Image (tube, helix red, strand yellow):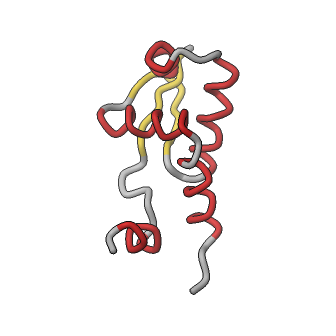
Amino acid sequence: MKISKTVKDQINAISQETRLIIMLLLSKKAMYVSELKKAIKIEPTLLSHHLDILRKAKMIKKERHGKKVFCTKIPHYLPKELIQVFSR
């Protein structure tokens, strides 16, 4: 069985605790970056780095609303391959 690059990227993305926390927060509701920063108490540059990794792994999307950036979890971001691994 070959594992796709997307699956590898997603496993890598959620293997880091801060990114997992971000995904848990976004699974409850979409949030502005400033709200995420306040919730997890990290520096803006580090948060931006984590969000970029999650975005590149196709797990979240970011939208600019004026001067603020809004983050949402992409529905069904987990590919079928990864769901199969965790449902066994």
Q: Is residue 48 visible?
A: yes
Residue found 53% across the figure and 35% down from its top: 62
Residue found 65% across the figure and 67% down from its top: 5
> Extreme left residue here?
28
Residue found 47% across the figure and 27% down from its top: 70
> Extreme bottom residue here?
1
Q: Is residue 54 above or below residue 41?
A: below
Viewer-nearest residue: 83 or 33: 83
Task: Specify the quadrant that holds the N terminus.
Answer: bottom right
Viewer-nearest residue: 45 or 63: 45
Q: Is residue 66 visible?
A: no
Image location (x, y in percent) of residue 50: 62, 35
Q: Is residue 67 left or right of residue 29?
A: right
Q: Is residue 2 above or below residue 58?
A: below
Image location (x, y in percent) of residue 61: 51, 41
Image location (x, y in percent) of residue 39: 44, 17
Q: How many marks can you see?
A: 0
Viewer-nearest residue: 3 or 73: 3
Image location (x, y in percent) of residue 78: 43, 60
Q: Is residue 79 above or below residue 47?
A: below
Q: Is residue 88 above or below residue 86?
A: below
Viewer-nearest residue: 1 or 76: 1
Task: Specify the quadrant that holds the C terminus.
Answer: bottom left
